[in-house]
């Protein structure tokens, strides 16, 4: 049986105060959520909704959760990663009217799923997920809830992949918006958010430079592109490992070296996995790596670096710095794993996730998608749905206005030309 965050803390009041301070700082730099908060407070578009969430519980997420509560919803939240919850923020959220938080840092596997089970106890009408654990848990353990669910939102590449697999198998029984795939999320959160936060947290956790090193990026989707782009901008040499020939060619044309991961293993100083798949770096790669190599994961689950094989290969391992586990191999080489192989930008000791301004955009999309499900659930059948383009554009316009950026409009003649098929030379 899961317990709330207040029941876990020695001094909940002090934790709430610190968490509130973090939330206030984040909100001050989130103009999209600030504007939505005004409209949600006035109209209460989520009145009567019960929202079950599994997310990275830190300050930016908390601003979204509070927004949903201000909009009239009862919200219950658990963590989506055992190491990414900030307990003070969780405590501050638990103090918000309409919010119950079961998220806590450092829980074991049983406690993790107990918290998700407790959140499902809100008897939800809408889900908001980061990795699809909530959706799969409901389908596996609480199928009786599915008829009342208006829909859900999924934030991550990994989660959307899982949901599309469910849909292909005919197993996804309610509608879910693929928030990850919409331009206002993909082009900014995945590229700039992941790129900046991953490298920042590697540098802060190790106190080592990125410049002058060879950074190996496994996977060249939007997240991998962001890591590669930012690493190159920090004067690192970048090697990309890919399985898709088009993405590999793209990486090559953008100036990066491209080679199989086993070849890159002997070249790299820093390794970052961004694939969403398992066993990306394995025993064969560990055996080729140089002494002192840093291994970090930026995929949602901790399966990309095969730590079981590394543990079997090593003669000993120890924590050499907070958030850094050193594995010593029989020949004396030492390989350093960051954040236990979990999301390095969220699960490390100093991790704060993506920059505030980036998450303002992503969570703005989450908020308007929840509002859309509350208002128009009958429009969407079971399966994975693209975010309606009008919602994505609306959020972009709010962001441009907040940045003081003006853009052009099409004239009537230009619109007619673009919409017509019979214009020729």
Image: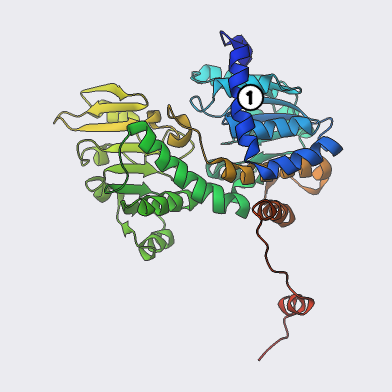
Q: Residue at x 39, y 52 (%)?
A: 228
Q: Position of residue 26 (x, y in %)?
A: 61, 35
Give residue 343's quadrant in the image: top left
In this rendering, position of residue 222 left or right of residue 260: right
Is there any visible trace of residue 167 in the rendered image? no
Where, quadrant-wise, is the N terminus in this rendering? Answer: top right
Asked if residue 90 can be seen in this view, the reply is yes
Query: For this view, does 283 lie left or right of residue 4?
Result: left
Of residue 249 and residue 228, the one placed in the foreground of this image is 228
Q: Could you tell me residue 268's position as x and y percent?
A: 26, 46
Q: Is residue 104 above or below residue 278?
A: above
Residue carrying label 1? 20
Vertical placement of residue 207 versus 217, above or below: above
Seen as rendered, the residue at the extreme right is: 43
Decide if residue 242 is on the left or right side of residue 266. Answer: right
Q: Residue at x 47, y 48 (%)?
A: 223
Q: Residue at x 68, y 31 (%)?
A: 65
- Judging depth in this view, the residue of 27 and 267 nearest the camera is 27
Coordinates of residue 91 in the picture (x, y in percent):
62, 19
Q: Residue furthest top?
A: 10
Vertical order, 175 against 253 (above or below): above
- Which of the colour schemes (rainbow, by chain, secondary structure, one colour) is used? rainbow
Q: Residues within 10 Å of mark 1 (few under 14, many from 20)?
A: many
Front-most of 82 and 233? 233
Specify the farthest residue to the bottom: 425
> Could you say where residue 49 lies in the image, as x and y percent from the top left?
80, 31
Total tally of numbered discs in the picture: 1
Residue 169 position (above or below residue 322): below
Q: Judging from the image, what secondary structure is the residue with disc 1 in?
A: helix
Quadrant holding the C terminus: bottom right
Residue furthest to the front = 404
């Amino acid at each position: 049986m899961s317990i709330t965050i207040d029941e876990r803390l020695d001094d909940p009041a002090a934790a709430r105060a610190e968490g509130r301070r973090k939330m206030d700082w984040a909100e001050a730099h989130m103009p999209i959520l600030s504007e939505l908060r005004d409209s949600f407070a006035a109209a209460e578009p989520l009145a009567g909704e019960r929202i079950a969430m599994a997310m990275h519980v830190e300050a930016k997420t908390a601003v979204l959760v509070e927004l949903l509560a201000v909009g009239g919803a009862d919200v219950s939240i658990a963590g989506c990663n055992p190491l990414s919850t900030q307990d003070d923020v969780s405590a501050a959220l638990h103090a918000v009217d309409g919010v119950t938080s079961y998220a806590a840092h450092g829980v074991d596997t049983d406690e993790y799923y107990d918290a998700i089970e407790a959140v499902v106890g809100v008897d939800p009408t809408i889900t908001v997920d980061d990795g699809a654990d909530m959706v799969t848990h409901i389908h596996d353990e609480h199928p009786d809830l599915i008829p009342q669910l208006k829909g859900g939102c999924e934030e991550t590449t990994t989660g959307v992949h899982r949901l599309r697999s469910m849909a292909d198998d005919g197993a996804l029984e309610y509608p879910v918006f693929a928030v990850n795939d919409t331009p206002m999320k993909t082009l900014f959160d995945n590229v700039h958010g992941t790129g900046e936060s991953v490298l920042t947290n590697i540098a802060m956790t190790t106190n080592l430079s990125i410049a002058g090193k060879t950074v190996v990026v496994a996977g060249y989707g939007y997240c991998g592109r962001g890591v590669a782009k930012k690493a190159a901008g920090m004067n690192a040499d970048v090697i990309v490992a890919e399985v898709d020939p088009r993405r590999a060619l793209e990486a090559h044309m953008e100036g990066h070296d491209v080679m199989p991961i086993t070849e890159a293993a002997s070249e790299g100083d820093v390794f970052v996995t961004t694939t969403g798949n398992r066993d990306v770096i394995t025993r064969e790669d560990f055996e080729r790596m140089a002494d002192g190599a840093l291994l970090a994961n930026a995929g949602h689950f901790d399966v990309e670096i095969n730590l079981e094989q590394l543990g079997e290969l090593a003669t000993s391992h120890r924590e050499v710095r907070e958030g850094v586990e050193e594995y010593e191999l029989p020949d004396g080489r030492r390989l350093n794993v960051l954040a236990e192989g979990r999301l390095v930008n969220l699960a490390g000791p100093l991790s704060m996730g993506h920059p505030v301004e980036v998450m303002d955009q992503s969570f703005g999309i989450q908020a308007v998608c929840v509002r859309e499900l509350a208002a128009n659930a009958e429009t969407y059948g079971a399966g994975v749905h693209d975010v309606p383009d009008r919602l994505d554009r609306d959020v972009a316009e709010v962001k441009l206005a907040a940045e003081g950026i003006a853009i052009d409009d099409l004239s009537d003649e230009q619109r007619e030309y673009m919409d017509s098929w019979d214009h020729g030379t």
